[in-house]
Image: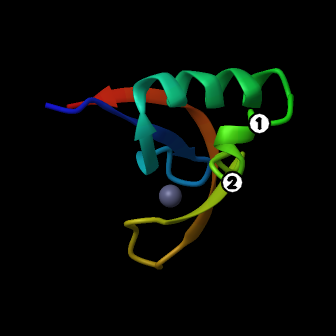
Amino acid sequence: MTTTVEFIYRCRKCGKEFTDGATGTKLGIQILIAVIQDMPMPKNLIGMRPNMLTLHTCSDKIKSTGVADFIGIHEKE
Ligand SMILES: [Zn+2]
């Protein structure tokens, strides 16, 4: 069974947390450290940096689109 790491975002508009993108566990930790320390990505991970902000299609009646922050990672088997 392979463990992957998913990138977690929280919408500023509606507060919902959701995942967007995934990678292997060790790579996920390396990516998270690079992001929080504002360092360049390791050469083998170039192109895998998660965006600090992304869009969220909120589940409200007026079909809002919110801005979501990258808030962390979690493991998923
Ligand atoms: Zn939202």
Classed neighbour count for the residue bearing mark 2: other residues with Cα under 10 Å, few (<14), some (14–19), many (≥20): few
Side (left or right) of 69 relative to 63: right
Q: Secondary structure at mark 2?
A: loop
Counting from the top left corner in percent of width and height, residue 15 is at: 50, 44
Looking at the rendering, which quadrant does residue 70 occupy?
top right
Q: Is residue 6 above or below residue 14?
A: above
Counting from the top left corner in percent of width and height, residue 74 is at: 39, 27
Say which residue label 1 marks.
Answer: 41
| Farthest-out residue, bottom | 62
Side (left or right) of 59 relative to 42: left
Query: Under 8 Å from ligand 1: the CB of mark 2?
Result: no
Mark 1 vs 2: CB contact within 8 A: yes
Residue at point 65%, 41% (across, down)? 45
| Farthest-out residue, front | 44
Residue at point 74%, 33% (across, down)? 42
Task: Give amino acid for label 1.
Answer: Met
